[in-house]
Amino acid sequence: MFGETPRIIGVREVRDGPPIVGSAYCVDRDAGGVAVWRLIIRGAELPGRWIVIDRQFRPAA
């Protein structure tokens, strides 16, 4: 949930994998209270907003 989420987290390509490849910035929450993220991977911002489901980023609807 948004209120319990850090504002910035490191992003890895695979869980428990090699070094961090980018950052995720918590920017909002959806109607259900789920944190919504902006992703920067290898210096480039991915378009759209993202949510986390089962420890994976998925496009926010």
Image (spheres, rainbow, N blue to C red):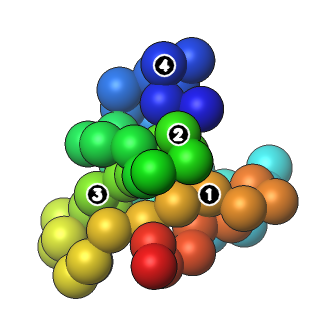
Q: Residue 17 location in percent, x, y?
A: 75, 57
Which residue corresponds to mark 1? Answer: 52
Are the two marked residues, 4 and 3, in contact with CB atoms closer than 8 angstroms? Answer: no
Horizontally, residue 56 falls left or right of residue 49, namely right
Which residue corresponds to mark 4? Answer: 3
For the residue carrying disc 2, how many other residues have a C-alpha within 10 Å: few (<14), some (14-19), or many (20+)? few
Nearest the viewer among 32 and 29 is: 32
Nearest the viewer among 59 and 18 is: 59
Which residue corresponds to mark 2? Answer: 33
Q: CA distance from mark 4 to mark 2?
A: 8 Å
Whichever of callouts 2 and 3 sits on the residue coming sooner in the sequence is: 2
Element at label 3: strand
Horizontally, residue 27 falls left or right of residue 10, namely left
Element at label 1: strand
Q: Nearer the viewer, mark 2 or mark 3?
A: 2
| Residue shown at the point (59%, 32%) measured from the top left | 1
| Residue shown at the point (45%, 51%) measured from the top left | 31
Q: CA distance from mark 1 to mark 3?
A: 11 Å
Q: Is residue 20 above or below residue 42?
A: above
Element at label 4: helix
Element at label 2: loop
Horizontally, residue 31 falls left or right of residue 25, namely right
Residue 38 is tagged as 3
